[in-house]
Image: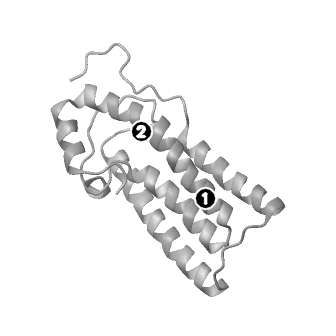
Amino acid sequence: MSTDVEDKPDVSIHPPTIFFAALIIGFVIRAFAGGGLPLPDLVAEGLGGVILVGALVLLVSSVSAFAEAGETLPPATPSNALLTGGAYRFSRNPIYLGMVLVGVGFGVATENLWVVLTSLAAGAIINFFVIPSEEAYLERKFGVDYREFKERVRRWV
């Protein structure tokens, strides 16, 4: 158990803002530079819809697990429980994964290559600038339990 005075991860980036900005940036780039996906409309809408539905199921189940454990969602807040069930059996970051998949699904459904690319870039930003701080905090807070969880479950999928 952590005895740190500052019982929270050192995260200064707000992930939902990053993902929302990625969507906006993707649409702005497309408006000026083009960049559609070479898919028939029906295929793009169907595939994008399937990705979106899967992403929303993942997000709802992951957020529900937080609520059931009495945890808060903002990454710069203390954790009282290590979530390892549900979607967390397959991904240590199912909420971030769901956010990336929402962007990718939306980009595919609207045939916007830039939204797909900016959503993936947002995932990379989270991967390199948010998750390492969260993981360091969880390791300090939960010790061997978190290290074992890290060995069993991949960061993304």
Who's the residue at 68% across and 68% down the image?
A: 112
Q: In this image, 116 relative to 51: left or right?
A: right
Who's the residue at 62% across and 73% down the image?
A: 109
Report x, y in % for residue 152: 20, 50
* Relative vertical location of residue 150 with respect to residue 101 in this rendering, above or below: above
- The amino acid sitting under disc 2 is Ile
Please say if the residues under marks 1 and 2 sit with CB atoms less than 8 Å apart: no
* Relative vertical location of residue 126 with respect to residue 9 in this rendering, above or below: below
Check disc 1: other Cα within 10 Å, few if <14, some if 14-19, many if 20+.
some
Return the residue nearer the eye: 13 or 128: 128
Q: CA gap, disc 1 to disc 2?
A: 20 Å
The numbered mark at residue 64 is none
Check disc 2: other Cα within 10 Å, few if <14, some if 14-19, many if 20+.
some
Task: Name the element at disc 1.
Answer: helix
Where is mark 1, residue-wise?
A: 117
Q: Where is residue 79, by image quadrant?
A: top left
Q: In this image, 16 relative to 95: left or right?
A: right
Where is mark 2, residue-wise?
A: 131
* First reached walking from the N terminus: tag 1 or tag 2: 1
* Relative vertical location of residue 139 with respect to residue 57 in this rendering, above or below: above
- The amino acid sitting under disc 1 is Leu
Report x, y in % for residue 69: 30, 43
| Screen quadrant of the C terminus | bottom left
